[in-house]
Image (cartoon, helix red, strand yellow):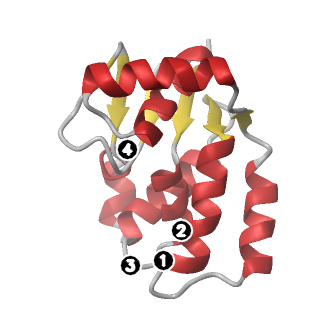
Amino acid sequence: MLKRVFVDDSALCKLFDDNFPIEQAAARNLIGNVENFTLVTSALSLATFFEEVTTRFSRSLQPVTAKQAVNDLTELTVVQLDSDLVVAATETQTSLDLSISEAITVEAALTTGCNFIVTEVFEQKEDIKGLQIERLKNMIIPEESAND
């Protein structure tokens, strides 16, 4: 059975972040690993990704490049925001002391049956509501990091 993995905007941004080569390699490996995982993201993560890579990177992407990246990322399973998801996220946000975007990530992952959330946020958390939290740098295969 394939594992369902939610990839948030912080992990998606690492695809283009040359300042963090290990995380960049891990992100590219994850996105390219469609045989072992069903990858899921959210419409909010895609929008935040676009804003981040076009306005906040030290070497921002040109909008045309970022638009193409978003278009390519829509090949993942994309969770749409709806009122039920937002209401559930507000409860998660208040009960777990998360930001609302983090809570939306958690709820989007739960509603799509994900086992993991790959993120560069959720500092010092290993599990949220039964979802395993993975950081990109922990996902790189040791042999790959030795070649960097």
Q: Please give the residue where the numbered disc 1 appears in the rendered image.
A: 56
Q: Nearer the viewer, mark 3 or mark 2?
A: 2
Of residue 139 and residue 104, the one placed in the foreground of this image is 104
Q: What crowding class fits label 1: few (fewer than 14 Cα within 10 Å), some (14-19), or many (20 or more)?
A: few
Image x and y of residue 80, in percent: 72, 32
Q: Nearer the viewer, mark 1 or mark 4?
A: 1
Instruction: Tell me whether the residue at label 1 lies in contact with that at label 2, contact meaning CB atoms closer than 8 angstroms.
Output: yes
Please, what is the three-letter code of the amino acid marked with disc 2? Glu
* Label at residue 139: 4
At 45% from the left and 86% from the top, the residue drawn is 58
Q: Please give the residue where the numbered disc 2 appears in the rendered image.
A: 52
Q: What crowding class fits label 4: few (fewer than 14 Cα within 10 Å), some (14-19), or many (20 or more)?
A: some
Q: Nearer the viewer, mark 2 or mark 4?
A: 2
Of label 3 and label 2, which has the lower sequence position? 3
Q: Quadrant for residue 48, please give it.
A: bottom right
Q: Quadrant of the N terminus?
A: top right
What is the CA distance from the residue labelled 1 to the residue labelled 4? 25 Å
Q: Is residue 2 visible?
A: no
Q: Please give the residue where the numbered disc 3 appears in the rendered image.
A: 19
At 57% from the left and 72% from the top, the residue drawn is 53
Of label 3 and label 4, which has the lower sequence position? 3
Please, what is the three-letter code of the amino acid marked with disc 3? Asn
Q: Is residue 147 visible?
A: yes
Please, what is the three-letter code of the amino acid marked with disc 1? Arg
Q: Nearer the viewer, mark 3 or mark 4?
A: 3
Instruction: Tell me whether the residue at label 3 lies in contact with that at label 4, contact meaning CB atoms closer than 8 angstroms.
Output: no
Q: Nearer the viewer, mark 3 or mark 1?
A: 1
At 51% from the left and 17% from the top, the residue drawn is 88
Helix or strand or loop: what does disc 3 sit on?
loop
